[in-house]
Image: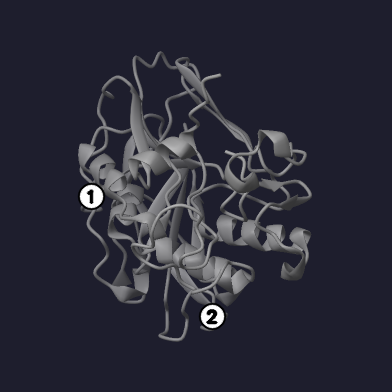
Amino acid sequence: MTPVLDRRTLLRATGATVTAGAVGAVAAGGLGSAAASPADPVFAHGVASGDPLPDAVLLWTRVTPTPDALPGSGQGPTVDVVWEVATDPAFAAVVGAGTATTGPERDHTVKVDATGLAPSTVYYYRFRLGDAVSAVGATRTAPATDAAVPRLRFGVVSCSNWQAGYFAAYRHLAERGDLDAVVHLGDYLYEYAPGEFPVGSTVRPHAPAAEMLTLADYRTRHAQYKSDPDLQRLHAACPWIVTWDDHEAANDAWSGGAENHQPGEGSWVDRRAIANRAYFEWMPVRNAGDRPLYRRLRFGRLAELSMLDLRSYRSQQVSALSGEGGRSQ
């Protein structure tokens, strides 16, 4: 029998660290070129937007208000961050503004659901903390529910392993300037310690220098990925629509455990809750209380996009169907 070539095996064979593509045709009135990385270290992790609706979009950033307020440290003061949304990159026409409070309890991340916006409209956004100003991000609302949308263009990415190489695919997508959104299919980051990934070399080591187990570990790793300039550019260029796979928590995750969660690593329930908390803090996705990750977004009468959560509720993988060394693909 001819073996099935799955997506992870293909990525490893070609040496790719991020898989990227585009679907659909050229978007009418696509977003402009990506914003530059922030110059102020207060906003060292960039800006992002996500989950576009016809009248709203989720905005994200992370602030470092004091030198001790490092990701995962649990240190630093509670601060009020100003956010602004405008129809022009110079912010001559501000259409929304407000203040969001953040502190060490949420790792100084900021998430704002900017509402009252017009459908199918490009907006620009930024954040302020005192005299510090973030990079300017560009985003776009979804078309009206009943709109006759002629075309859409999405960038599609997954499996971005920091240790295996650099994020050139993110850079190429950011340079396009014609994407309505980026869809991330999961494995936004990897949990392994430096050198522990089963395949490939360590081009740039993970931080912290250990497998992610604690809340501080997961927060620190998210921060490391968000420090990548190409990732920052693509986040600032257009809205993202994300879901997780398994490495956001641990390899081959299922409802009751994971292949890469060992008996000496504590409770899987606790680890999964920690991983999910850090994910929702650091990713531009809506969440409130027990709201699930799976959701559906509509783009006029042209398309509905269902984002699935295929890890939180599944039963354990059948070992006979697993790949190399018991690792399913």
Contact (CB < 8 A) between labels 1 and 2? no
When asked about the image quadrant of residue 64, the answer is bottom left
How far is disc 1 from disc 2 in space, using C-alphas? Answer: 34 Å
Identify the residue at horizontal 28%, vertical 24% (top origin): 27
Q: Would you place residue 80 above or below residue 300 in this image?
A: below
Viewer-side label of 1, 2: 2
Residue where numbered disc 2 is placed:
73
Q: Would you place residue 19 above or below residue 45 in this image?
A: above
Identify the residue at horizontal 50%, vertical 58% (top origin): 197
- Residue 54 appears in the picture as rendered: yes
The extreme front residue here reads: 1
Front one among 132 and 224 = 224
Which quadrant holds the C terminus?
top right
Identify the residue at horizontal 64%, vertical 71% (top origin): 214
Residue where numbered disc 1 is placed:
89
In the rendered structure, find residue 134 and report the number of the disc placed on it: none
Front one among 2 and 152 = 2
The kind of residue on which mark 2 rests is Ser
- SS for dot 2: loop
Give x and y (percent) for residue 68. Answer: 46, 86
Of mark 1 and mark 2, the one earlier in the sequence is 2
Give x and y (percent) for residue 140. Answer: 36, 37
| In this picture, residue 100 sits left or right of residue 31 | right
Q: Would you place residue 164 above or below residue 70 in this image?
A: above
Front one among 27 and 163 = 163
The kind of residue on which mark 1 rests is Pro
- SS for dot 1: loop
* Disc 2: CA contacts within 10 A as few (<14), some (14-19) or many (>=20): some
